[in-house]
Amino acid sequence: MAERVAGTGNPNFISVNHGRLAINVPLSVFRGRSTRFREPEASAFFETPRSRYPWLTPGAIEEIKREARAAMRSLIELEEGELDRARRLLEEGKPTRAMSVVSAYLEANPDDPDALQLKGRIHFALGDKEEGYRSFAGARKAERPKRKAAGER
């Protein structure tokens, strides 16, 4: 089980439990806001518990790494909004899932130009250029009232 370190007031760590052993994994071992580890920092960090607790096998360290990645993924999903999630899914090569997220968002926010623009990009990724162009046109149309309100042309 993994979670943000509670009670320490330090948002820079994720707590990963391996049995009764709690390991506070620093967010700095990850590459930005992703689940990929930054090397050589990650290797050095994960060697520390192994040297302190010789009973930890290489398999146990791999399990702790998997838990840390899962915790980071949960943290990213918790902190990102729906459009950010859809963008991330698109970047990860999951356009069908991205489309379901952005479509659900658009049900509640049908005139959001950013969401319509993203929907167009997703349509292109799915190979549906006509729908993509329609979404881009919808985004431009939704943007016009905002520009008028701001005094732009």
Image (cartoon, rainbow, N blue to C red):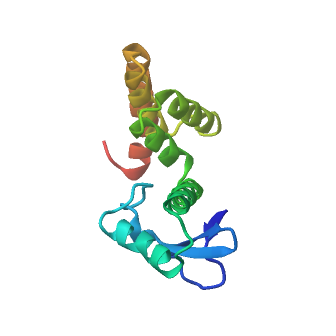
* Vertical comparison of 132 with 139: above or below: above
Q: Residue at x 37, y 23 (%)?
A: 124
Quarter placement of the C terminus: top left
Quarter placement of the N terminus: bottom right
* Vertical comparison of 131 with 61: above or below: above
Query: Quadrant location of residue 10?
Result: bottom right
In the foreground, 143 or 43: 43
Residue pushed farthest front? 55
Query: Quadrant location of residue 29?
Result: bottom left
Q: How many marks?
A: 0
Q: Residue at x 37, y 20 (%)?
A: 133
The x, y position of residue 143, in whole percent, is: 42, 39
Q: Does residue 94 show up?
A: yes
Residue pushed farthest bottom? 8
Give the side of residue 2 with respect to residue 62, left or right.
Answer: right
Give the side of residue 137 with respect to residue 2, left or right.
Answer: left
The x, y position of residue 6, in whole percent, is: 65, 78
Give the side of residue 147 with respect to residue 7, left or right.
Answer: left
Q: Residue at x 56, y 55 (%)?
A: 70
In the foreground, 70 or 99: 70
Q: Residue at x 54, y 35 (%)?
A: 102
Query: Quadrant location of residue 128?
Result: top left
In the foreground, 102 or 74: 74
